[in-house]
Amino acid sequence: MILCSCSRLTRAEVSEHVTQTLRDDPYSVITPGRLFHETGRSIRCGFCCALVDQMIAKELARLGRGESPTAA
Ligand code: FES
């Protein structure tokens, strides 16, 4: 499934990149900008950024790295 039509970034690539990044550094902060840069792409229109951010969060949660609700 393509998440970014400008750069042809797929859901599978996001999943793979998040997994690999956390394998290399478990304390990495992964943002859409970083993901685009590290996969050799650039953000053009920006329309997909919220969706890519959401996918990153889903992958982090799937890998047990999602943010847990905090008691304020
Ligand atoms: S849809 Fe991703 S930058 Fe345009």
Image: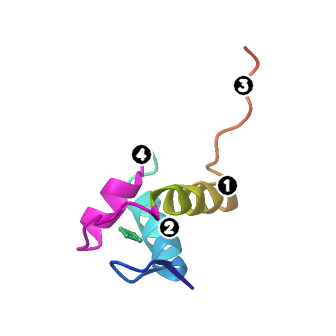
Q: Disc 1 designates what residue?
A: 61
Q: Please check the rendered image and state whether residue 36 is part of the magenta-colored stretch, yes or no.
A: yes
The C terminus: image quadrant: top right
The residue under label 3 is: 70
Picture quadrant of residue 23 = bottom left
**Left or right: residue 7 compared with residue 50:** left
Instruction: Read off the magenta span.
Output: 30-48
Q: Earlier in the sequence, mark 3 or mark 2?
A: 2
Q: Position of residue 67 (x, y in %)?
A: 64, 40
Find out whether residue 14 is within the magenta segment. Answer: no
x and y percentages locating residue 55 in the rendered image: 58, 63
> Which amino acid type is shown beneath numbered disc 1?
Ala
Q: Quadrant of residue 70?
A: top right
Q: Main secondary structure of the magenta part?
A: loop
- Mark 3 vs mark 2, CA separation in Å: 24 Å
* Marks 4 and 3, the one that precedes in the sequence: 4
Observer-side mark, 3 or 2, equals 3
Task: Give the camera-side residue of 48 and 52.
Answer: 48
Q: Are marks 4 and 3 in contact (CB under 8 Å)?
A: no
Residue behind mark 2: 19
Q: Residue at x 42, y 70 (%)?
A: 17
Earlier residue among tags 2 and 4: 2
Q: Quadrant of the N terminus?
A: bottom right
Nearer-N-terminus badge (1/2): 2
**For the point 45% across and 79% down, which residue is it?**
13
Quick check: marks 4 and 1 in contact, CB under 8 Å? no
Residue 32 occupies quadrant: bottom left
Direction from residue 4 to residue 69 in the image, left or right: right
Q: Residue at x 76, y 19 (%)?
A: 71
Distance from mark 2 CB to nearest ligand 1 atom below 8 Å: no
Q: Earlier in the sequence, mark 1 or mark 3?
A: 1
Circle 4 is placed at which residue position?
A: 29
